[in-house]
Amino acid sequence: MKRTTPLPLLFSLQMSMLLRNVHEVITKDYEMPYYVSYILFAVLTVLLGGFLGLVLVCCVDCIYPFLGGGEYVHRPRQPPPPPRAQEREVRQRLLFAFFFFVCLLTGPCEASQFFRKLLGSQRHVQH
């Protein structure tokens, strides 16, 4: 069976050889310092990336001009939840973060026993 090199690998090798040759021409034929070629490559990379990004955005805008069917849909803002619900959500998040931290330190079995005791004592206080 004949082994072939993948096309993208060949392309990248050819591109690296081309860039190496350009670097040698700049540094040896034109006798410029090596950092000039590095700056040139950096500027060309940024310009090429910007151009390709602009082309991509224009193509996407031509294909999908508006996702909402061409019209802006106004959605009224939802009222904020009552403060009590916000407090409950904050407590739940803090409790989860604390539980996660205790699990990291002690392991899940010990942490679950600890929180069963803790939540059991809080349930009696709340009723």
Image (cartoon, rainbow, N blue to C red):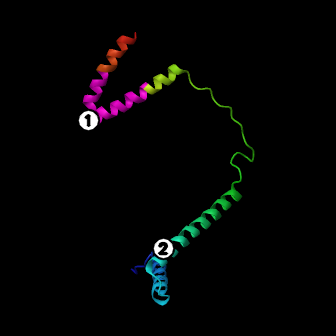
Q: Residue at x 68, y 48 (%)?
A: 67
Q: Position of residue 52 (x, y in %)?
A: 60, 66
Say which residue label 1 marks.
105
Q: Could you say which quadrant of the image residue 54 lies in? A: bottom right
75 relative to 83, above or below? below
Q: Main secondary structure of the magenta part?
A: helix
Q: Position of residue 66 (x, y in %)?
A: 71, 50
Q: Residue at x 69, y 35 (%)?
A: 75
Label disc, if present, on residue 8 of the rendered structure: 2
Residue type pointed to by label 2: Pro
Q: Which residues are magenta?
A: 91-116
Q: Could you say which quadrant of the image residue 5 lies in? A: bottom left
Q: Quadrant of the C terminus?
A: top left
Q: Residue at x 34, y 19 (%)?
A: 119
62 relative to 100, above or below? below
> Is 70 contained in the magenta span?
no
Is residue 59 left or right of 93 when viewed as pictured?
Answer: right
Label disc, if present, on residue 72 of the rendered structure: none
Q: Residues within 10 Å of mark 1 (few under 14, many from 20)?
A: few
